[in-house]
Image: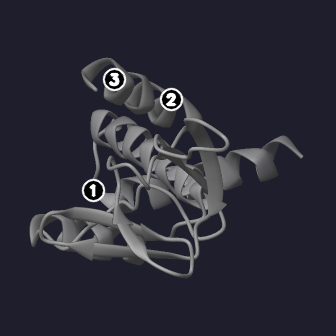
Amino acid sequence: MLEMDALQSIDRLAEYEDTGLSPAEVMELKFKIERLRAKVIAYEKSGLFPDEVVELAQAKRDGRLVVLPCKVGDTAYYYIDDDELAGPYVGEFTVKGIQILSDGFYLSDGDCWDKIGTQFAYLTREEAEKALKERENNA
């Protein structure tokens, strides 16, 4: 039994020596493998694969990568300041479309398009309420 363990150890040592690597180089490779493993796990958790990340990075370098301010189906907000019956109020709509033009993002409720940050297209109720208040204070 002891003789068998010694022969296996000699074989393993010979395999290691055949690599031509020093112990420090082996440790460095081990560290690199662990870092790569961590990156693969992060990619898997993100739902992206390395080739997709390369494609996104290239698009960013080319100036083609755009992060949309919201998604179709989200709720957006608007304000009305001249309704004689209801008075000033903030309303909401479901985003049916998103456009990217040279001057910014536009949202659609299905009937018309409005630039984000103008009277008829805000991403949060708070933004719309603040704009309505500013409008009323400047009137």
Query: Quarter-wise, where is residue 131 in the image?
Result: top left
Whole-number angstrom distance, CA of label 3 to CA of label 1 = 73 Å
Query: Most extreme residue toward the right, as rendered?
Result: 1
Circle nearer the N terminus (1, 2)? 1
Name the residue rendered at 52%, 81% in the picture. 111
Q: How many marks?
A: 3
Labels 3 & 2 near each other (Cβ < 8 A): no
Question: Which mark lies nearer to you, 3 or 1?
Answer: 3
Query: Quarter-wise, where is residue 133 in the image?
Result: top left
Whole-number angstrom distance, CA of label 1 to CA of label 2 = 70 Å
Labels 1 & 2 near each other (Cβ < 8 A): no
Name the residue rendered at 50%, 57% in the picture. 70
The residue closer to the viewer here, 34 or 58, is 58
Going by the image, does 38 lie left or right of 112?
A: right
**Residue bearing the label numbered 2:** 129
SS at badge 2: helix
The residue closer to the viewer here, 74 or 133, is 133
Question: What amino acid does circle 2 point to?
Answer: Glu
Name the residue rendered at 69%, 54% in the picture. 8
Query: Most extreme residue toward the front, as rendered?
Result: 84
**Residue bearing the label numbered 1:** 20
Question: What amino acid does circle 1 point to?
Answer: Gly
